[in-house]
Image (cartoon, grey):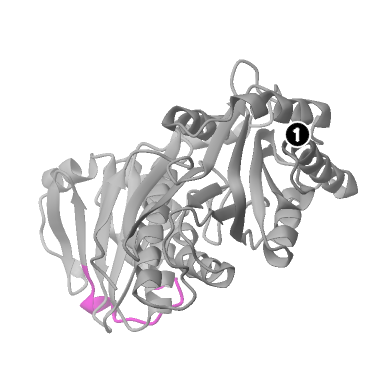
Amino acid sequence: MKGVKMNIIEGGVTAAKGFKAASCAAEIKYKGRTDMAMILSDVPCHAAGTFTTNVVKAAPVKWDQEIVYHHEGARAVICNSGIANACTGEEGMRYCQATADAAGKIFGIPSDSVLVASTGVIGMQLPIERITRGVEMMAPVLEGSKEAADKAARAIMTTDTIPKQAAVEVILGGKTVTIGGMCKGSGMIHPNMCTMLGFLTTDASISKELLQEALSEDIKDTYNMVSVDGDTSTNDTVLLLASALAGNPEIKEKNDDYYAFKEALHYVNETLCKKIAGDGEGATALFEVKMTGAGTKEDAVTLAKSVVTSSLTKAAIYGHDANWGRILCAMGYSGVQFDPEKVDLWFESRAGKIKIIENGVSTGYSEEEATRILSENEVTAIADVKMGDAEATAWGCDLTYDYVKINADYRS
């Protein structure tokens, strides 16, 4: 159901009815900046979630999976940056419980309605006294304002250089429904989620089952198509809370309202994903790869991911070098069968579009024009393998000197 009319609005997790946000400086690892955020719903929400595929799962991931999969509702999300609470054993799980208990006591809500998330250094134990004090600090300053959402989006950042938010309105059942969200992510980012935390809120009335299905399906074409560096994190989490306060008829089946909701959700997720990719550690450019003409959707996904994760291709993007041989090479080792002598390739950006190869050979393009196109901060490679009509898009970034600098001394 493409072409649903949407109203793109400013805002993040407080844009939808019934949600407040807050942040504070708990000094968990960082000094002189906020490092905790909270989202609180006025009412119990249906909750959906998707999580890392890494076998090594952080304590908050295990905590949230239990709540999302086995409990009916959720009221709050509490997130800290700086320390990941990963590889922390039973003590890490007790700290999740302690965080939830602190919120439960303050707000008079069940501890098992409190979702938690952490991001940062692996292997360190959380300073739980600072975490619980942070919950106490945030409680009186919770607001439903855009400013509160902005501050929350900044508080969850680690090596991110910018906060990441998006929001949209759509009409469902004659009512205005809002979906908003914030995320963080800059490094340890690879398909199947990343060191990426995403928190989405909506005032739509939708069954828990369809809310989960909508999120799980959309992840495949959004967060799972982002790669910065090939490392899949231990903490990846996307949570979606639905308050039902918009007053639309509850979506209980896959009708037009369901597909309109999915399209609006996709807009928010794709917007956030592109912000993550463009803010990759040390990056100077968002690198988008559109694969068209594939025989199957799976082939298109595999080809696009192979190109967007190629270190040599990423380095060429950083150098504004139209080294198309690296792209064709990355497609060739992807495992997908195609005829390299049928491939067409273009580079595109705000500066223009240029066809680089046609049927597997150079078009004799202008290197100067190609460099001008590749010098923008958002660059797209479009490949047509002429095997069918399936397509997929992946997002990544260029590979720079600063990426190594950032990750060589991350723990310090």
Residue 285 lies in the magenta-colored region: no
Q: Quadrant of residue 266?
A: bottom left
- In the displayed structure, 155 sits above or below 388; it is above
Q: Quadrant of residue 164?
A: top left
Of 410 and 98, nearer the camera is: 98
Say left or right for 114 vs 353. right
Say left or right for 194 vs 81. left
Give how far across and how far down residue 407 sits, in percent. 59, 35
Give how far across and how far down residue 263 sits, in percent. 35, 64
Say left or right for 53 vs 252. right
Q: Quadrant of the C terminus?
A: top right
Residue lying at 51% horizontally and 44% vertically, measured from the top left? 18
Residue lying at 50% horizontally and 50% vertically, measured from the top left? 201
Residue lying at 71% horizontally and 51% vertically, measured from the top left? 113
Q: Secondary structure at mark 1?
A: helix
Q: Amino acid at mark 1?
A: Ile
Q: Quadrant of the N terminus?
A: bottom left
Q: Which residue is mark 1?
A: 106
Residue at the far right: name it: 90
Residue lying at 27% horizontally and 83% vertically, measured from the top left? 387
Classified by dominant secondary structure, the portion drawn in magenta counts as loop
Give the total of numbered labels: 1
- In the displayed structure, 169 sits above or below 126; it is below
Does residue 157 appear in the picture of this structure?
no
Q: Where are the magenta residues, as a range?
A: 332-344
Give how far across and how far down residue 267 sits, in percent. 35, 56
